[in-house]
Amino acid sequence: MWRLLERIAKLERRVSAIYDAYAVRASHVPPVAAFWREMAADERMHAVVIAAARELFAPSESPPASEWARELIDIEELIRTVEAELSGPLSLADAFARADQLEGSELNTLSKLIIEHAGTGFSRLGPLLTDWPVDRHHDKLAQGWERLAACVRTGGADA
């Protein structure tokens, strides 16, 4: 279980780094850059929560039954693809499309299952769960696109 939690926390941190890169690329459009920085901070918090959940499990405890290995390989492949795209041109629309794929991936599902599996012991981490569940993060992305899409129409801001 501990290895699974560490792996998921690392993936959350990599998604955070992607959003940080989007913020840097959009630094010339402050509202867009601020949005990506906020998304990156949320992902870092997801990683903290997942890493903290480790303390609720015995080192030898098995993860909940699922096809973790296959799901994590798919998520890692998606993240690698998005990371590779950071070196080329990227429109705001493309960044949101990639973020939509990341937020719609199984990473959020796995994170949510970990929290549910942690059960009542996780209540001790209540202050870290202010912006949980991870489901809301996908909604935040959609709302951000609605709010910031005007940047695309009025000049095609970068990510």
Image (cartoon, rainbow, N blue to C red):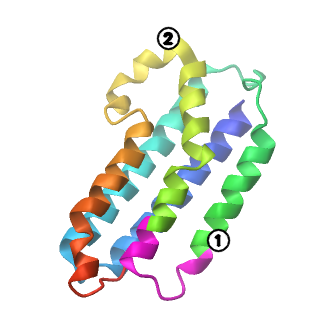
Residue at x-position 34% and y-position 64%? 36
Residue 134 part of the magenta-drawn span: no
Q: Is residue 137 left or right of residue 51?
A: left
Identify the element where label 1 is drawn: helix
Q: Relative to 76, does residue 89 appear above or below in the rendering?
A: below
Task: Give the magenta part as a residue range.
Answer: 84-96
Question: What is the three-letter code of the residue carrying label 2?
Answer: Thr
Between the C-alphas of marks 1 and 2, the distance is 37 Å
Residue neighbourhood size for the residue with mark 1, other residues' Cα within 10 Å, grouped as few (<14), some (14–19), many (≥20):
few
Question: What is the three-letter code of the residue carrying label 1?
Answer: Thr
Query: Mark 1 or mark 2, which is nearer to you?
Result: 1
Residue at x-position 53% and y-position 26%? 115
Q: Which residue is mark 1?
A: 81
Residue at x-position 37% and y-position 30%? 129
Residue 136 in which image quadrant = top left
Query: Disc 1 or 2, which lies upstream in sequence?
Result: 1
- Residue 145: percent from the left, percent from the top? 31, 62
Q: Is residue 27 visible?
A: no
- Marks 1 and 2: CB-CB under 8 Å? no
Q: Is residue 144 left or right of residue 18?
A: left
Q: Is residue 127 left or right of residue 117?
A: left
Identify the element where label 2 is drawn: helix
Q: Residue 120 got which mark?
A: 2
- Residue 130: percent from the left, percent from the top? 31, 32
Residue at x-position 54% and y-position 42%? 108
Residue in the foreground of this view, choosing between 105 and 48: 105
Q: Quadrant of the C terminus?
A: bottom left
Q: Is residue 76 visible?
A: yes
Residue in the foreground of this view, choosing between 6 and 33: 33
- Residue 153: percent from the left, percent from the top? 25, 80
Q: Is residue 157 left or right of residue 46?
A: left
